[in-house]
Amino acid sequence: MAEESEEDFFLPDLCDAQNILFLFLFLFLFLVLVAELLVFVVILANSSTVDFSWSDLGLVSLFVQWIVLLSAVVLCNLRPYLAGLVTGLATFIGYGVILLLTLIFSVLAEWLLLKESWGISQSGNVARNLIIAAVMTGIAFCYFFLQNQLRQQ
């Protein structure tokens, strides 16, 4: 597959000044709201309605939003480089960058919240975060790819 121009690239250009309205709507409505729904599901799955923890909701929400928004900024800055690559390699690198950010901030968050020595619980939390990020990133990349295919028709 040949290299793609930046206009034909499947990742949306979130840095383009002409797309500020799209950027705001996309980031807020899609990324932020979907991430918050995911946070609610994770928090509700780990608690009952009697012992629901608002502080856990706040911490997980902050963590997820930090990763989502930072990933958007990093992909925005990497887009010109990624657009010069074949789609498969660009997807692999973008996917890997998001998982790397998730790994770094998961380890950092577990270290900051560490109450005892690092153990299986912290490793399990990091693995859980990576699995969730892998699934959500795959869904988002599929959405971007299909949106690009529709735009090219």
Image: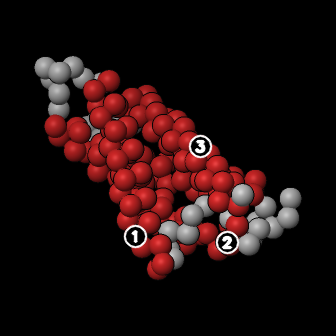
User: Which residue is label 1 attached to?
Assistant: 21
Lateral position of residue 4 relative to residue 16, left or right:
right
Q: Which residue is mark 3?
A: 138
- Which SS class for mark 2? helix
Tell me how the rendering is colored.
Answer: secondary structure
Asked if residue 91 lies left or right of residue 78, the reply is right
Q: Is residue 107 above or below residue 23?
A: above
**As rendered, which of 120 and 98 lies closer to the eye?**
98
Query: Where is 64 relative to 89, above or below?
Result: above
Q: Amino acid at mark 3?
A: Gly
| Location of residue 126 by image quarter | top left
Asked if one can make out residue 35 in the rendered structure from this viewpoint, the answer is: yes
Three-letter code for the amino acid on which mark 2 is drawn: Glu
Task: Name which residue lies at 17% across and 40% down.
Answer: 55
Residue at the image position 68 percent from the left and 72 percent from the top: 6
The span from disc 2 to disc 3 (Cα, nearest Å) is 22 Å
- Among numbered discs 1 and 3, the one appearing first in the sequence: 1
Q: Position of residue 153 (x, y in %)?
A: 72, 58
Q: Quadrant of the N terminus?
A: bottom right
Relative to 36, say whether 4 is above or below. Answer: below
What label does residue 7 carry, if any?
2
Judging depth in this view, the residue of 10 and 44 nearest the camera is 10
- Seen at 79% across and 61% down, the residue is 86
Observer-side mark, 1 or 3, equals: 1
Horizontally, is 37 left or right of 103 in the view? left
Q: Position of residue 72 (x, y in %)?
A: 48, 62
Q: Amino acid at mark 1?
A: Leu
Dot 2 crowding, Cα within 10 Å, few <14, some 14–19, many 20+: few
